Structure formats: C-alpha cells, structure tokens
Image: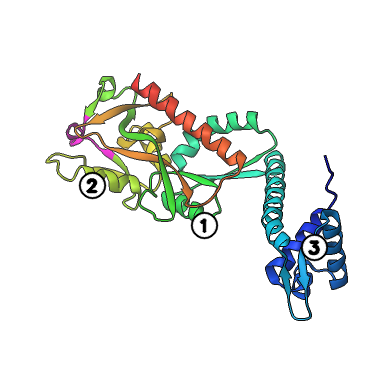
Amino acid sequence: MTRINFAFEELQAFVAVADRSSFRMAAEHLCISQPALSRRIDKLESALGLRLLERTTRQVDLTPGGRQFLERARQTLEDLEDAVTRLSDDAQARRGQVTVACVPSVAQHVLPGIAKAFAQQQPHVRLRVIDDSAHRVLASVVSGEADFGLNFTGAQDPDVDFEMLGQDDYALVLPHGHPLAGRASVAWADLADQKMVAVSRQSANRLLVDHALAALSRRPLWFYETEHVAGALGLVAAGLGLAALPRLSVPPRHELLRAIPLVDPVVSRVVGLITRRGRTLSHTACQLCQLVRQSFTEQQAAAGG
C-alpha cells in the first residue's frame, strides 16, 4: 500500500486557499506568511503527485484534480475536528461541571439521591444546583446558565424542549395525631371547616390550586399564609393548621407530618425535564439526565404499586 505523507496543516492551507481563491487572504486567515503558505501547498502537491491549484497573477483556480480532492480534504478536516471535540468533551467529563436548575421541592427531596448516584459514576465532575422558583429555573435554562432544568413550567415556551417525567399530585399535609390522619384520602370539600395554611398568592402552587377549586361550592379558606413551602410545613408541624401541597414538597417519612391524597378533584402538576431548544448536552449532562429519568420512573412505579 502506498503511504501518503502529508500533514494536517498542509490540508488546512489547501482548503483555506480553495475557499478564498487567494494566497494572501488564506495566509492572513491562517496567520502565516505567504511564503510559508506556498511551501505547505508545494509539500501537499508533491506528496500527492498532483497539481491542485493553477496560479496566475490575478487569481487562483482549482485544477480538476484539485476540485476532486477538495471534498475529501474538507471531510478529513471535519473528522479530525470532531475527534478533537470528542476528546475535549471526555476531558471535560473527567474534570468538568454540570449545572442543573430545579424547583426547591425537587432539590430537597428528589435530587440528593440522584446526585449521589451521579457522584458514583462521575466522581470528578462538579455539580452545581440552582434551586429557585419555577420562573428562575426556566430563565436559567433559556439563558444557558443551566445545562437543563427540572420544572413545572416551560412546556409552552418556544425556546424550550419539555420532556414530561411524571405527575406530582397535591396531598393534605397534617400532623400524625389529627382526626383526618387515618383516612386513605380526603376530599377538598372536607377541608372547608379547617384552618388552612397556604403559600403566597404569587406562587405557582397557589395559583394552580385556586384555579382547580374555583368551581367548588365548599372549598378551603386560607387562614395562614407563608412565602415558601418550608414555612407552611413549619406551621403545620406546630399544629396551627393543615396544608394542601404537592407531594414532592413533603419530606418522606417526616417524624411529625404525613401526607394523604386529596381527591374530588385530584389536582396535580406535571414535572418535566427542560432543555434549551437546539442545545446539545455534554456526555456527563446526558448521564445526569438519564439518572433523573430513572429516578422519576421508579417513583411513579412505586406510587402505582
């Protein structure tokens, strides 16, 4: 087999000249002198045993052989650049960072287990968590600050791809010793006479519940109001009232509280994995996404069982 002996920079030189039909412009693009560029072209033509370029005082044209070789040369450069990019991604995987944005309920009660599994797979990759409101999570993904997000909004955003992970049903959160604590489920109408703890009217949780219950003749009246779910849980734990909250926001196996399904109607929010449309995730970010999907699949299976 005949050995072809030419260098990467000689291919670069040829493609640069072919694209610009000018030695001067190609040399400026490659940040080398014109004589150095000419030497690279001469070496390539010598290695191939083929003239690639016809040079006149006014312009540079491709020979028939040059036109045929140009397509192969471009493909070779693209393949090499792709290989370098993949190696760079692998290096980033070993010493990189993945940023995930998620609402606080997911950050507190779902993400820790996922992060632990991810740390076992990628012990050298740093994980940054943006745990904030649904609006901030969406903005972080759209701006590119976060690789991906776990959110309840974004399905209608034209800049975002929304992948449904599951549903998060609302539950009644109450102390273990409360008279309703022994029920398998509780109807919303049964809460009309209870002192209820609600989150702020500016919260997406509150807006969803108020909209879902608007048609009920008997519905809960909010006696206490907090800005965040953590504050609502604290008031319920103190025995001041009951709260209707998404199940994901309630710590599992809480020593003071339990969560009971709310029915008639069942109110739920959709949990989704959101990514910026058109963005290609790194290998490590994809690994974390897969762990997220696996976690929610297991949770849905457990809830169904």
User: Is 212 colored magenta in this rendering?
Assistant: no
Pointer 1: what residue?
Answer: 143
Q: Secondary structure at mark 2?
A: helix
Left or right placement of residue 73 versus residue 209 in this view: right
Three-letter amino acid code at the position of disc 2: His
Mark 1 Cα-neighbour bin, 10 Å: few <14, some 14–19, many ≥20: few
Q: CA distance from mark 1 to mark 3?
A: 49 Å
Q: Is residue 220 above or below residue 45?
A: above
| Towards the viewer: 141 or 45 | 45
Q: Quadrant of residue 266?
A: top left
Left or right of 236, for residue 264 = left
Label 2 vs 1, first from the N-terminus: 1
The answer to which of marks 1 and 3 sits earlier in the sequence is: 3
The residue beneath circle 2 is 211
**Left-right relation of 184 to 123:** left
**How far across and how far down the image is residue 291, in percent?**
53, 32
Quarter of the picture holding the C terminus: top left
Name which quarter of the figure residue 236 lies in: top left
User: What residue is drawn where x is 57% and y is 35%?
Assistant: 287
Q: Is residue 188 magenta?
A: yes
